Image (cartoon, rainbow, N blue to C red):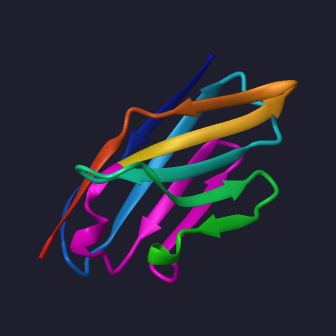
Amino acid sequence: QVQLVESGGGLVQAGGSLRLSCAASGSIFSSNVMGWYRQAPGKQRELVATIFSGGSTNYADSVKGRFTISRDHAKNTVYLEMNSLKPEDTAVYYCNLAFFVLKKYDYWGQGTQVTVSS
């Protein structure tokens, strides 16, 4: 079993910053990918950023240059530093951990609300 616990969401004014954290615990294969997704009201969940255990990263075009994903292997924690926030960044942000051992294992956090006021 794997558990993901997110923290760091909240209310911020446009142009402000927030840092999200997601701590993973349980049986985690060392080769994995962790990431952040978000879902705004009435919209589908979308990828924000991912980071592989080897360090390579991937970002949605809408957040490139503003958001930075990083991870601490020792703590099994992934972070999302969000700067220059915009009202359109308002969403519930979900942490994800995935790895493949004979089959794909896919885990989600409970979600944390990020609200950016104009």
Query: Magenta stretch: residue 76 in it?
Result: yes
Horizontal placement of 44 versus 115: left or right? right
Name the quarter where the N terminus is drawn.
top right
Q: Please determine whether, in this image, residue 111 is positioned above or below residue 43.
A: above
Q: Please determine whether, in this image, residue 53 is positioned above or below residue 102.
A: below
Name the quarter where the C terminus is drawn.
bottom left
Question: In this rendering, does residue 79 appear at all?
Answer: yes
Residue at 65% of width from left, 66% of height from top?
58
Residue at 77% of width from left, 51% of height from top?
53
| Percent x, y of residue 94 | 43, 44
| Percent x, y of residue 63 | 46, 74
Q: Please determine whether, in this image, residue 55 is positioned above or below residue 33.
A: below
| Percent x, y of residue 15 | 25, 81
| Percent x, y of residue 91 | 29, 54
Horizontal placement of 73 versus 101: left or right? left
Tally the marks: 0
Query: Magenta stretch: residue 55 in it?
Result: no
Magenta highlight range = 64-92
Residue at 21% of width from left, 71% of height from top?
87
